[in-house]
Structures are given as C-alpha cells and as structure tokens.
Amino acid sequence: MQSSEQSRWFAEEVKPHESSLRAHLRNVFPTLPDIDDLVQEAYVRLIRARETGRVTYIKAYLFTTARNVAMDIFRRRKVVSIESIADPARLSAAEEGPGVAEAVSRQQELDLLAESIRSLPERCRQVLTLRLLYGLSQKEIAVELNISPHTVKAQLAKGMRRCTDYFAARGLTHARVRPTGTCKE
C-alpha cells in the first residue's frame, strides 16, 4: 500500500475513533498505567491486519484489538517465574483445581456458541457478531451495516431464536446467551 494512501486511510477511517477508544479503555481497564502504548499497539495490529485484507469493520476491529492487547498485558502480569514457586506441589494442585474445569467448560460453551453463529444466514450472523463479539449498540450496527435499526432488532431476535434452537437440538434445553456472548446452561 502506498504511504500516502495509508496515511489518508488512517486519518479518515481510524483516527476519528481514537477519543472514544481511549475513553472506552480508561473505563474498562482503569488500572492500566499507559493507555498510549496500548492504543499504539492496537494501531499497529490494525494496520498489519488491513494489509492482509482481514479488516472489514474498522471500529469493531480496533476496539477488539485494543481489548486483546490489554488482556495480553494482564496475562503477562499473571505469569509467575518458575523460580518463584517454592512448593512444586502447589503448582500441580493449581493446575488441577476447579479453574481448569471451569476454563474447559467455558471454552466448550464458546465453541458451541461460535458453531451456532456460523450456522446463521449471513446478515443475521453479521448483526449477532457485531453485537455479541464487538459489543456494538443496535444503532452502531445499523450505521456499520447501512441498515435500519428495526432490521438490526429483527435480525438480533432471529439470531437469538436460531441459536436457542441450535442449543436445544443438541440437548441444551436450558441454554441461554448471556450479554457477554457466552452460552450457559
């Protein structure tokens, strides 16, 4: 991509979202010390992804990427060096505790939700993905997809019904989709 084209794209398509991105990050991750580094890393990842053609919804991709960068920072903080563990038995007990089972269960729920969303018609899948995965409001989805808010509402309802039917067909009769986008029995 030409440098001037990339600069134009960045200035017109990405930069307008910076203030709302920073406000969102301060609100969701108030303990992060340096929002500037996080935003810059999100920009770098967005530009790389655009060069490979993987970016469809710029704002959604930018916000999700920034969240992922923040989560990476938190994961790095939780990493414990092997020298700091005095009792190796505590390490194996932690690996086998309820956290592992809960994580596996949650991953299975997410996989099932992803399968159900992939089975939806394209427009319905787009709307549900923008709502559940990227957390966009109905109004933001309408603007992003250039459809009416009423259509967004109808597609969300249709998608939720179809996902519920998908879960029921697999024996999860009490499954529901939580606002975070995960499925729970």
Image (cartoon, rainbow, N blue to C red):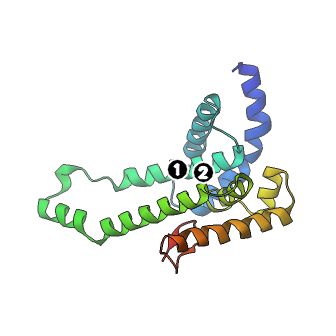
Instruction: Work out how far the residue at label 2 is from the one at label 1, CA to CA, in angstroms.
Output: 6 Å
Residue annotated with mark 2: 64
Q: Quadrant of residue 91?
A: bottom left
> Where 161 sits versus 65, above or below?
below
Q: Position of residue 175 (x, y in %)?
A: 53, 76
Disc 2 residue type (three-letter): Thr
- Going 42% across and 61% down the picture, which residue do you hit? 107
* Tag 2 near tag 1, CB within 8 Å: yes
- Left or right placement of residue 46 versus residue 20 in this view: left
Residue count near mark 2 (Cα–Cα under 10 Å), binned few <14, some 14–19, many ≥20: some
Disc number placed over residue 2 in the picture, else none: none
Residue at the limit of the structure toward the front, as seen here: 169
63 left or right of 75 in image: right
What kind of element bears circle 1?
A: helix
Residue 16 position within the rendered picture, expressed as x and y whole percent measured from the top left: 77, 44
Residue at disc 2, secondary structure: helix
Which quarter of the figure is the N terminus placed in? top right
Q: Which residue, given by chain and number where applicable, does mark 1 sit on?
A: 68
Q: Which residue is at the front of the view, 171 or 53? A: 171
Three-letter amino acid code at the position of disc 1 = Asn
Is 125 placed above or below 173 here?
above
At x 74%, y 40%, the residue is 15
Residue 29: in sight, yes or no? no
Q: Is residue 97 left or right of residue 141?
A: left
10 Å crowding of disc 1: few (<14), some (14-19), many (20+): some
Q: Nearer the viewer, residue 68 or 151?
A: 151
